[in-house]
Image (cartoon, helix red, strand yellow):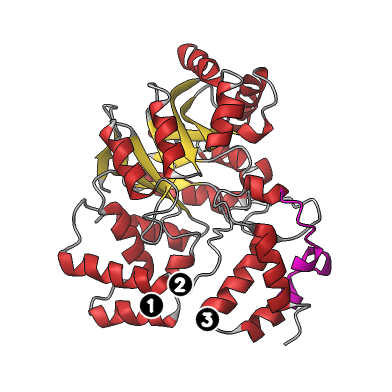
Amino acid sequence: MQYRMFGKLDWKVSALGFGCMRLPTTDGNPMSGNIDEKKSIRMIRYAIDQGVNHVDTAYPYHNGNSEIVTGKALRDGYRQKVKLATKSPLWLIQKPEDFDTYLHEQLKKLSTDHVDFYLLHGLSAQRWENVILKFDLLRRAERAIQDGRISYLGFSFHDKYDSFKKIIDGYGGWTFCLVKYNYLDTKNQAGTRGLKYAASKKIAVEVMEPLLGGRLANPPQPIKNLFDRFGKKISPTEWALRWVWNQPEVAVVLSGMNSMEQVKANILWANKAKINSLGTEELKLIDRVRKKYKGFIPIPCTKCGYCLPCPNGVNIPAIFELYSDGSVHKDMRTARLLYTRFVGERERAGACQACRVCEEKCPQKIAISEWMSKVHAALGEGKP
């Protein structure tokens, strides 16, 4: 396993971190609360045994059950082998005391007396002003650091670069940040500018969505052709991960793994994850792939599920996935058939009332209500 310095800390983090957002489930729904505990615990412990020393979860993952299963996986001595991270659910905080209430609940669910890395979850300019500053949560967090409930404070981010810089500059106690970053998102959200800016401040940068919600692992055929013609037997998944690991500013890549096969593959690649290991021709290949790819994907949805539950019952991530797949693969007929088979009648795009509640919660800032009308026109009632 490759290890990297974690910002200003005298500690090295494994290149691969275990993200507990997409653990295997018993019902096949990757976001449900029905976690397959035995498989999940086996996967997490296997990764730790192979050198992974950072495990990340959050309050809402798997309908609140991810923290519980993560805590179980870290029993029997595994807790001492890793730095554990979870996140404060800012959207639920209505008063200053809520910060401590949720932290207490999380510590209980995780079966631990402290969290090594505590993140303010999903920071944006709006939440910075209306939650963090309004309720003086930074002082609450500092008290938690002083009494040992958390060791280091950071934040995950979903907004524009200017907001990212404002948040970085707005507090001198940040130890780390978590940003969405992959070869398609170099100019989205924090982007490359944010990556470099945080690193210049000695703030450790963790990366989420290195595969864009899995989309980069299974690209359309024209993209696969570009990789194949390059002549190296490297999968699209490995190319995407290698590109992120190539960046000297990246401390760790968090991967949400849902099978032992994925864990083993990611560990194999992480063992070779060296900084500046891609040559000029390899970087030019990624540039060509990026240009080609951006012409295919209509909606930048990563299926994170933050938009759910919809007040009107619309299954937003599932609908966007079908529509995007149909667009990318130019096969709306199959998309319509799958729409009928897997999306309930009351969950379809036609049920959208344009209330825009989902848009306030969407990390990607997608104009969901506008897209719903387009999706409804394209998929209709699922008729070919």
Question: Which of the two labelled residues, at mark 3 and mark 2, occupies the earlier sequence position?
Answer: 2
Q: Give the Cα distance between marks 3 and 1.
A: 11 Å
The residue located at (53%, 40%) in the rendering is 57
Q: Earlier in the sequence, mark 2 or mark 1?
A: 2
Q: Secondary structure at mark 2?
A: loop
| Quadrant of the image occupied by residue 316 | bottom right
Indicate the secondary structure of the residue bearing disc 1: helix
Please determine whether, in this image, residue 112 is positioned above or below residue 355: above
Does the segment drawn in magenta span residue 373?
no
Mark on residue 218? 2
Query: Which residue: 29% across, 67% down?
Result: 286
Q: Which mark is residue 356?
A: none
Residue 329's disc is 3
Q: Is the residue 79 above or below the residue 300 in the image?
A: above
On the rendered structure, is 251 left or right of 178? left
Q: Is residue 321 left or right of residue 352?
A: left
| Magenta range | 339-356
Mark closer to the chain start, 3 or 1: 1
The type of residue carrying mark 1 is Ile
**Could you tell me residue 100's position as x and y percent?**
62, 20
Q: CA distance from mark 2 to mark 1?
A: 9 Å
Q: Residue at x 27, y 48 (%)?
A: 1
Q: Which residue is mark 1?
A: 223
Relative vertical location of residue 282 with respect to residue 122 in this rendering, above or below: below
How much space separates mark 3 and mark 2, taking CA atoms?
11 Å
In the rendered view of the protein, which quadrant contains the C terminus?
Answer: bottom right
The front one of 239 and 201 is 201
